[in-house]
Amino acid sequence: MDINGFEMGFQGEVLQRGFWLYVWEITYSQTTYVYVGRTGDSSSPNASSPFNRIGQHLDFRENAKGSSLAKRLREKNVDPKRSKFRMLALGPLFKEQESFEAHKPFRDQMATLEYETAMYLHTMKFNVLGTHHKGKPAPLDMIEELKSKALEFLIKRAS
């Protein structure tokens, strides 16, 4: 029997619930893809941790819910079992809110933060997966810092 061993590690802070932005780098064959996402549900007051979103995103069953990364990779005929994944989680940028009414303004700002980061990476010639839609205005300094950190992450390849 030939047993494979794989190492995984993470910092405990990624277990915090709240509004996070994350950037995935997925390498398959000779192609690298980028996926930008966020936490903060559209239809409930929940804002999960990025660690929680990892499992949802990587559920490759046809009927999986919340698996937008898996769907985007399937569209590109990427074999996830033959891919290399890296993720940068940025946040929490805002705390999880008590009510849906309090949640919505942060959710809408997160949509803009996600959109601006994805569009920036696209202009920097990264192969960005998915579609992104602008929400409500977000702090410009936060947008600039997120774009900078995302770019730095993608330029610094895993060794």
Image: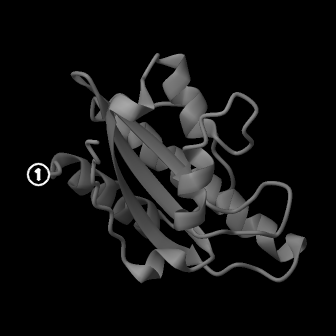
Residue at the spot of label 1: 159
Q: Which residue is drawn at 59% across and 35% down?
A: 60
Left or right of 117, for residue 28? left
Q: Which residue lies furthest to the front in this view?
A: 1
Assign the N terminus to one quadrant of the image: top left
Label 1 secondary element = loop
Left or right of 135, for residue 50? left
Q: Which residue lies furthest to the left in this view?
A: 159
Left or right of 10, for residue 15? right
Left or right of 159, for residue 81? right
Q: Which amino acid does label 1 sit on?
A: Ser
Question: Residue 110, position in %: x, y?
Answer: 61, 59
Q: Which residue is drawn at 61% across and 42% down?
A: 59
Front position in the image: 52 or 2: 2
Front position in the image: 4 or 103: 4
140 relative to 11, above or below: above
Its colouring scheme is: one colour
Q: How crowded is mark 1: few (under 14 residues within 10 Å), some or many (20 or more)?
A: few
Asked whether residue 44 is in view, the answer is yes
Question: Residue 126, position in %: x, y?
Answer: 31, 32
152 relative to 95, above or below: above
Question: Residue 149, position in %: x, y?
Answer: 30, 61
86 relative to 129, above or below: below
Q: Which residue is drawn at 35% across and 65% down?
A: 145
Question: Residue 52, position in %: x, y?
Answer: 60, 64
Q: Which residue is drawn at 38% across and 41% down?
A: 120
